[in-house]
Image: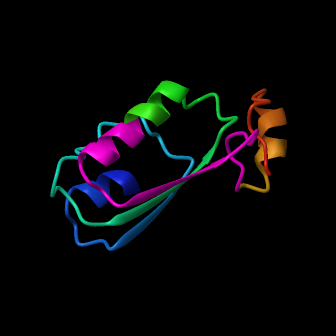
Amino acid sequence: MVLHLAHIGTGIDKVPSFHSSLGAKIPAEKDSGNARVVVFHGEGDHFIPTEQVIAFKGKMQNADEIYEFIAYPNVKPSFTNPQADEFGKESNLPALQYN
């Protein structure tokens, strides 16, 4: 949602995005928004395929958006959630992990 808000010109200046759904339809067109975007992404997040990461970066570059993409090697989804390990075990989702 925050990536969408950054690109539709809502007046938001800066947007941090954690665990982003990079495959979402983002209207990243030239002059569509002016928010600076920082994406924090775990490279071990198998819910977000590499193709989505590449496509997202391409959209951002084509739209001349100011963004930073910070990828953490071998980091799985939910890396900012201290309860992720426990939730992953309870839900049989071993891909979730706090880092």
Indicate the position of residue 28 as horizontal and vertical percent values: 24, 46
Indicate the position of residue 83 as horizontal and vertical percent values: 79, 52
Left or right: 74 as drawn, with respect to 28: right
The answer to if 74 sits in the magenta stretch is yes
Left or right: 14 as drawn, with respect to 39: left
The magenta region covers: 56-80
Indicate the position of residue 7 as horizontal and vertical percent values: 26, 55
Observer able to see residue 80: yes
Q: Please name whichever residue, 74 or 97, is drawn nearer the observer in this view of the structure.
A: 74
Q: Residue furthest left?
A: 31
Relative vertical location of residue 46 with respect to residue 71 in this rendering, above or below? above
Q: Residue at x 48, y 35 (%)?
A: 53
Q: Quadrant for residue 90, please give it.
A: top right
The answer to if 42 sits in the magenta stretch is no
Q: Residue at x 31, y 51 (%)?
A: 4
Indicate the position of residue 26 as horizontal and vertical percent values: 29, 43
Observer able to see residue 1: no
How are the residues colored? rainbow
Relative vertical location of residue 78 with respect to residue 23 in this rendering, above or below? below
Q: Residue at x 78, y 42 (%)?
A: 97
Give the number of callouts.
Answer: 0
Left or right: 3 as drawn, with respect to 46: left
Q: Quadrant for residue 75, please give it.
A: top right
Q: Please name whichever residue, 48 or 58, is drawn nearer the observer in this view of the structure.
A: 58
Relative vertical location of residue 79 with respect to residue 59 in this rendering, above or below? below
Q: Residue at x 50, y 46 (%)?
A: 20
